[in-house]
Amino acid sequence: MFLLALPLAFAAPPPSRPSSPRSPRVAALVREAEAALDRLDIALARDLWAQIYDLERSTVGICQLGQLDRRLGRWVDAAEELTRCVQEMRPPATPQERRLHDTRHADLAATRRQVAELRVFAPAGAAPVLVDGRLVDETGRIYVEPGPHEVTAVLPDGRKARSTVRVAAGKSRAAVLSPEPASLHPIAPPPVVRAGAPAQPAAPSSPWLLYAGSAASGAFLVSGVVLHIVASLEDSSLRTEMCKADWEETEAARRAMLAIDVKQHISTAALVAGSALGAATLVVALLPSGTQVRASAGGAEVRFSW
């Protein structure tokens, strides 16, 4: 027995990492959460771990919340919590910690395939940024449910900048916020004509205005169509690369996705501007100068004239 005990006596003890002791309240909540997990009461276990995390903000707590939200199908919350879990985990020092480290990264990758990501590009000074009315931190990843989303922000002058983006599960899209136009100046009233004064003949529309409007409208429409085709081809090529087995998300790929999204937004804006300019040119060409349009509602009258 003495000879068998010699190797144990001289063996170096395994390295251990100091851990701060838990408070009695936290220890009791941990026991209740573990008992709820043994009973497969995932909702109760999640609520108990939320209380634990409020009392003691630890990496273990945020990792447990991410795992429980993942089992409950709360994918957006799980993605945010597992992202923080992976960021806060210390580098593994033992095989057991390495397995846990790899498992957390695999869980995060699987969860991100169930949600969508938004990257918000807001004008300078725009705050706060809301996604579907929910306050978000636009400096990091914004996880959302797949589908359409409205992103808004408030500019320093009180105007709003907004954008509507549709994004699929496992994909990432950029939301470029466009500010609302500034308020229009009031239109001066038409000059008063004395009773009995001869009516002045309406001046014909200027031909150069029609030619310039038509040319500008055509330029916007052509550039919008060309830019949309280019963005579609680049998007198709990038998706083909993403489907390859050895594809990895790099900074160059993220910049390429951002460039494609910006081109699509610019092409849409060019098409809308060309259509609006063409419609305005058509109105000016068909209606004679001096025509007035009146619209009244609730006792208020708005008059447009040209």
Image: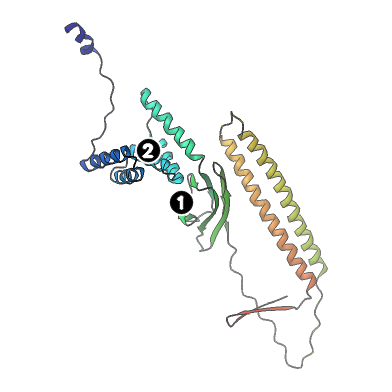
Circle nearer the viewer, 1 or 2:
2
In depth, the one of 126 and 130 nearer the eye is 130
Residue at the (37%, 27%) spot, across then down: 97
145 shown above or below 94: below
User: Where is residue 233 shown, x and y percent of the image?
Assistant: 70, 41
Residue at the (64%, 76%) spot, across then down: 187
Residue designated by label 1: 136
User: Where is residue 286 shown, x and y percent of the image?
Assistant: 79, 71
User: Where is residue 175 shown, x and y percent of the image?
Assistant: 56, 50
Which is nearer the N-term, disc 1 or disc 2?
2
- Name which residue type carries label 1: Val
Q: In the image, is 51 to the left or to the right of 237?
A: left
Label at residue 63: 2
283 shown above or below 47: below
Circle 2 — which element?
Answer: helix
Q: In the image, is 23 to the left or to the right of 170?
A: left
- Furthest toward the front, the residue is 39
- Name which residue type carries label 2: Cys
- Furthest toward the left, the residue is 2
User: Where is residue 153 shown, x and y percent of the image?
Assistant: 51, 57
Circle 1 — which element?
Answer: loop
Residue at the (46%, 32%) spot, across then down: 106
Q: In the image, is 42 to the left or to the right of 127?
A: left
Residue at the (26%, 29%) spot, across then down: 18
Residue 22 is drawn in which quadrant?
top left
Disc 1 to disc 2: CB gap under 8 Å = no
Badge 2 crowding class, 10 Å Cα cut-off, few under 14, some 14 to 19, many 20 or more, is: many
